[in-house]
Amino acid sequence: MSNAPSLALNGVHLEYPDGTGTINALDSVDLSVRPGQLAAIVGPSGSGKSSLLAVASTLIRPDSGSVGIGGVDVTRLSERARAALRREKLGIVFQQPNLLASLNAVEQLLISAQLRGESAKTARQRAIGLLDLVGLADCAGKRPHQLSGGQRQRVNIARALIGAPDVLLVDEPTAALDHERGAAIMRLLRKVTDEFQVAAVMVTHDIEFAALADSTAEMRDGRLTALAAA
Ligand SMILES: Nc1ncnc2c1ncn2[C@@H]1O[C@H](COP(=O)(O)OP(=O)(O)OP(=O)(O)O)[C@@H](O)[C@H]1O
């Protein structure tokens, strides 16, 4: 395992306007995640977890502080360069899978791969391999309505991995699932973090699921505090 962090937030500050004042959505946040490390972020609603993911995913530029991805401070990059970096280095798993209703599982992955300019043949092989890895070898031809909630979330995870990202950002992956399916998704995230050696950050409401992570930090009023270290 390399010791250099793939994702490094340092002194990140983000404010939103709030009436006549401002809200500190992120207040001096530091976070460092190495390849193969799964970092869990827990915290109450409104504490800043989504803001943290938005900044780490380069979708929002913080007011101050640095966001390093693969050693590059992305806060200094143009919007165009950040979009390219998102395609090349980041995999994002949103809370809701947002799959396209008319496409089967393998096609959901192919769209992402082809956006990255991969050849159709290579992309198909990789997509089928990934579906196998997430436990959906028999579901490649199924469309979203033919899949369970847990299976749709597995497609979501496989789609985020198709570009071989260095950093995987995961927002409440178990929110819409019962406990058993949620636990299975957590085990899958642990497995893909190890297998792909991604630096993974997962936001979760469920502290119990954080047990599979290498580190857990709590967000409260925009401040991030480590609860347990690897
Ligand atoms: N676009 C926005 N404009 C103004 N305030 C915002 C905006 N987005 C978030 N906030 C505020 O910033 C703070 C942090 O919100 P954030 O969504 O990051 O928290 P969260 O921990 O992800 O909450 P949840 O679990 O409910 O999604 C909250 O006080 C929220 O009301």
Image (cartoon, rainbow, N blue to C red):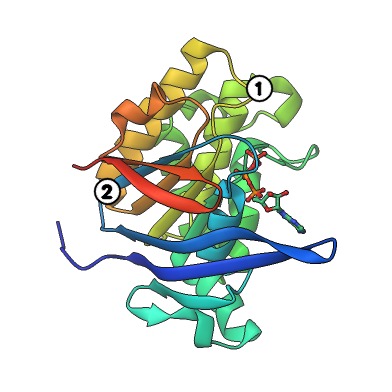
Residue occupying image coordinates x 27% and y 52%: 197
Amino acid type, label 1: Leu
Figure quadrant of the C terminus = top left
In the image, residue 95 above or below residue 159: above
List the residue tagged with mark 2. 37
Could you say which is closer to the camera, residue 181 or residue 26? 26
Can the viewer see residue 92?
yes
Residue 212 % position (x, y) = 30, 29
Amino acid type, label 2: Gln
Tell me if 151 is positioned left or right of 201 in this view: right
List the residue tagged with mark 1. 147
Residue occupying image coordinates x 63% and y 36%: 45
Could you say which is closer to the camera, residue 155 or residue 37? 37
Q: Are marks 2 and 1 in contact (CB under 8 Å)?
A: no
Tell me if 51 is positioned left or right of 9 in this view: right
Residue occupying image coordinates x 14% and y 56%: 1
